[in-house]
Amino acid sequence: MSGFDIWGYHPNAGYLQGTDIVGFKVEATDGSIGKIDKHSEDVGASYLVVDTGVWIFGKHVLLPAGTIERIDMIGETVYVNRTKEQIKDAPEYDEAKKAGESSYLERFGRYYGR
């Protein structure tokens, strides 16, 4: 991921600005992790919020847009370049803290940027 902003969509990932991907399935490198609950296109702060359902007890996780490897628009599936374990161990997503707090997003950037 070096040289690429973790908070931006990769040009080759297949994402077209303005596309609604809420409800798309999300696949880690080693299996399914849930469905997209919401996503952001904010410049310098684009991300997905994934509802993991029963996989990790209904936890919502935040994935920076830079973790997206590719999007299958026909199959409505987003493939990310992280393992299920990496995603499970990510900081807890808290909707109340997200709004306007760059330091909150920095925690995720440090974690996923490793």
Image (tube, rainbow, N blue to C red):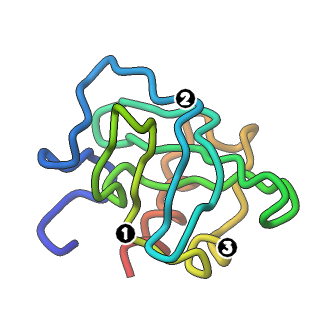
Q: Is residue 84 left or right of residue 11?
A: right
- Which residue is label 2 attached to? 22
Q: Residue at x 55, y 29 (%)?
A: 22
Picture layout, residue 103 above or below residue 2? above
Amino acid at the residue labelled 3:
Lys
In the image, farthest residue toward the front: 75
Numbered circle sitting on residue 81: 1
- Which residue is label 3 attached to? 88
Q: Residue at x 72, y 39 (%)?
A: 95
Amino acid at the residue labelled 1:
Asn
Figure quadrant of the C terminus: bottom left
- Quote the CA–CA distance across marks 1 and 3: 14 Å
Picture layout, residue 16 above or below residue 84? above
- Quote the CA–CA distance across marks 1 and 2: 19 Å
- Name the N-terminal-most of marks 1 and 3: 1
Q: How many residues crowd mark 1 within 10 Å: few (<14), some (14–19), many (20+)?
A: some
